[in-house]
Image (cartoon, rainbow, N blue to C red):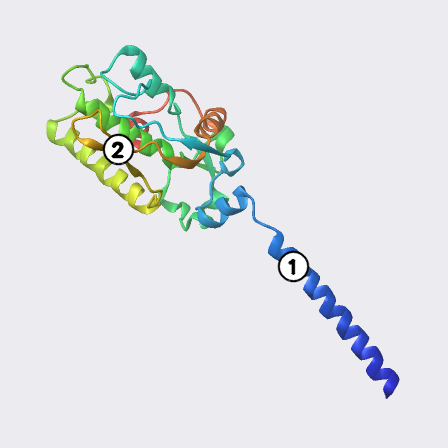
Amino acid sequence: MYSYNRVYNVVAAFFFAVSLVFHFVARNIEPNDLDCVRATSSWSPAFGAIEYQWETFQNGFSQKSIYRGEPTPELEMAWLDSLPSSPIPIPKSKLSELQLSDEEYLEGHGDFEGSLYGNLEVFRNLGCLNLLRQHTYRDEFDYSFLPAFKGSEEMIMRRVDACVQRLREVLMCSGDATPYLIMLTPEKKTKESPDFNTLHYCRNYDRILDWAKENEIGRRGHFPDWYEFAIV
């Protein structure tokens, strides 16, 4: 009996020690960025392209930007180049991870059989922002050739309003809780000004855009107006 109890105690002590080792090792293993993305985002074919970097937003009132200011051909091209030109294939086998059924979506054909046509939401959001910008300057620049500006004034405003709703949902969903501070600006008339140049841990947009362009189905002009509306 003494020998049996001794063996039992040794084995129990061994497994207890092993469990302690695993416990402390697990506590010190932190998930990487991609693990966090997978745990907090809907499935995406672009997971492998996601890379993070620290950036300080450049939001000064007079801050220069290739995307900012009155429209010029160069500025319009900068916005156009920031978006893909055609859809990407979405595997039908992944729809269950998006809680979707394949019964209601446009299917690919040829080389893209077994896929559905779609794109990444960031491009929809940027397209909406671009539409709001274009609508602001529509009296200074001719956008009438764009699908979003075709139709009645009521139809155009419905598209603009849909984009406002879209961007509201996106901003409220992300709920950015980064604080901004109030600067002392004695040289200015107001004496205090909000500082919106805040630090953020951002996804590298260029990598996501490059991935989309490498995986897109065709080129601009190969798809009907519905794709332009899908972007804006």
Image coordinates of residue 103 in percent, x first then y, are: 38, 46
When asked about the image quadrant of residue 181, the answer is top left
Task: Give me the residue at 26% from left, 21% from top.
Answer: 62
The residue sitting at the right extreme is 3
Question: Quick one: SS at disc 1?
Answer: helix
Examine the rendered structure and indicate whether residue 9 appears above or below residue 47. Answer: below
Task: Give me the residue at 37% from left, 36% from top.
Answer: 121
Examine the rendered structure and indicate whether residue 212 appears above or below residue 168. Answer: above
Between residues 61 and 188, which one lies in front from this camera angle?
Answer: 188
Image coordinates of residue 208 in percent, x first then y, are: 46, 30
Quarter holding the N terminus? bottom right
The residue sitting at the left extreme is 153
Q: Is tag 2's residue or tag 1's residue first in the polypeptide sequence? A: 1
Q: Is residue 86 left or right of residue 32?
A: left
How many marks can you see? 2
Disc 1: which residue: 24
Q: Amino acid at mark 1?
A: Phe
Q: Residues within 10 Å of mark 2 (few under 14, many from 20)?
A: few
Q: Is residue 64 visible?
A: yes
**Camera-nearest label, 2 or 1:** 2
Between residues 154 and 112, which one lies in front from this camera angle?
Answer: 154
Q: Residues within 10 Å of mark 1 (few under 14, many from 20)?
A: few
Image coordinates of residue 46 in percent, x first then y, are: 49, 36
Image coordinates of residue 122 in percent, x first then y, are: 37, 34
Q: Amino acid at mark 2?
A: Leu
The dot on residue 184 is 2
When asked about the image quadrant of residue 185, the answer is top left
